[in-house]
Amino acid sequence: MKEKFKNKKIFHFIYPIIFIFISVNCSNKIKPTEKFSLNFPLGLDSLIAQIPKDNPLTLKKIKLGRKLFFDKRLSVDEQIACADCHNPLLGFADGRSFAKGFEEMEGTRSAPTIINRLFSKKQFWDGRAASLEEQVIGPILNPIEMNNTKENVIKVLSKDVSLKNDFKEVFGSDITIIGIQKAIASFERTILSGNSPFDRFITGDSTAISLSAKKGFLLFKSERVNCVACHKGQNFTDELYHNTGIGTDKKDYDFGRFIVTKNDSDIARFKTSTLRDIARTAPFMHDGSLRTLKEVIEFYDKGGIKNPNLSDKMKPLKLTEEEKDNLIEFLRSLSGMNPLAADKIQTMSSN
Ligand code: HEC
Ligand code: HEC
């Protein structure tokens, strides 16, 4: 695993901020087709970025997507925007165990962060959306999220002349569902988290993280603890599905990946989460059942929750209290540093 973390090519450029803010440069002189090239913060690599050929990034499209991401008119009662469940101030999650949508209805899964989504093809805890574009329509139509219809979204948004003009400029068409999908997906691809204390440490700044976090990292990748069996690479995920037992101690539990593939071996398997910004997105796991990082470590220490399909990578770890603290310190060192993020994004949400 070591090589993964030591890939020097990733670290040629140091960018001082984690999120790429498009709010600057708001000039109208930008050509609609002008390509936008992402600046990857320290620790992230462009090589595995998933940008479909038929949806190249352009500045105008990203700005349109940002507008739509904060637009409550995507929901049938015009009360809920994407940003209400993926709140930039809450690590692009919602701080809740179960997301709350249309008329305060609760779903059965927790809203994941949407940082670094451009590194994944498949989206959702069970990977049922094949791309970010495909994902966008999910919450818009979901009866307990935005509860809308495609026709109604188009009807309501089309009353907005300025938005209509934006679509004309970006897509050369009226407002369309596919345009909404492409624009929001493009905006999401710019929400990057890197340049964490850990990234600075691994690229040579030995003072960037505490001794405890360093020991935690050694445990994290050790053969004994082996978190990297699943949380590997620059985004700390193998993009695969595993059964850690979360939820399986409840009656009628969530079958996760099985719902998509109908393979028995996929029962209660969920997508390995990224661990970047993890200290910002409690509660944890697909059902928000673990409230603190301490609870997460205790969970892994016990070897997960026994069930017929438990991953063979889950074993009791017999961690000492000090080792548990070290692992938590390491996880905390994965938060991207950007004191301005909150301010900038608040400004973004209001324009
Ligand atoms: C009511 C709350 C709610 C709203 C509104 C909402 N989401 Fe989500 N979002 C969730 C939940 C819950 C999940 C996980 C669902 C699942 O995996 O089945 C999720 C998953 C996602 C994912 C997948 C992340 C991953 O790691 O796989 C993306 C991307 C996303 N949402 C973007 C959006 C966008 C874009 C919008 C607006 C069009 C939106 N969401 C609106 C709650 C919400
Ligand atoms: C067998 C693969 C596997 C191993 C080993 C593993 N994880 Fe996970 N991890 C996952 C999966 C899958 C999830 C999502 C589980 C769910 O929600 O049902 C997850 C979720 C998490 C989360 C919560 C993410 C979130 O956004 O809610 C944290 C934190 C975490 N793991 C840390 C660790 C640490 C620390 C270790 C080592 C002690 C570890 N993991 C070992 C697969 C694994």
Image: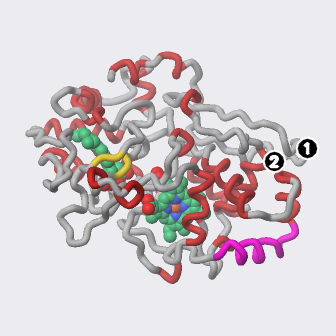
Above or below — where is 238 with respect to 102? above
Q: Is residue 166 left or right of residue 143?
A: right
Above or below — where is 275 with respect to 218? below
Outermost residue, front direction?
263
Query: Where residue 56 sits in the image (x, y, percent)?
Result: 73, 40
Residue at 8%, 39% in the rendered image: 318
Helix, strand, or loop for circle 1? loop
How packed is label 2: few (under 14 Cα within 10 Å), some, or many (20 or more)? few
Residue at 83%, 51% in the rendered image: 170
Corner quadrant of residue 237:
top left
Query: Where residue 14 sits in the image (x, y, percent)?
Result: 57, 24
Query: Where residue 106 sits in the image (x, y, percent)?
Result: 41, 76
Query: Where residue 89 sits in the image (x, y, percent)?
Result: 51, 57
Q: Is residue 256 left or right of residue 99?
A: left
Q: Quadrant of the N terminus?
A: top left
Q: Is mark 1 within 8 Å of ligand 1?
A: no
Q: Is residue 101 left or right of residue 350?
A: left
Q: Which mark is residue 26?
A: 2
How packed is label 1: few (under 14 Cα within 10 Å), some, or many (20 or more)? few
Residue at 26%, 58% in the rendered image: 290
Q: Is residue 80 visible?
A: yes
Q: Which mark is residue 29?
A: 1
Q: Is residue 113 visible?
A: no
Q: Is residue 285 left or right of residue 338?
A: left
Number of numbered markers: 2
Along the line of sight, the residue nearer the viewer: 211 or 43? 43
Q: Which mark is residue 296?
A: none
Above or below — where is 196 with respect to 304? above
Along the line of sight, the residue nearer the viewer: 103 or 351? 103
Q: Which residues are magenta?
A: 149-161
Q: Main secondary structure of the magenta part?
A: helix
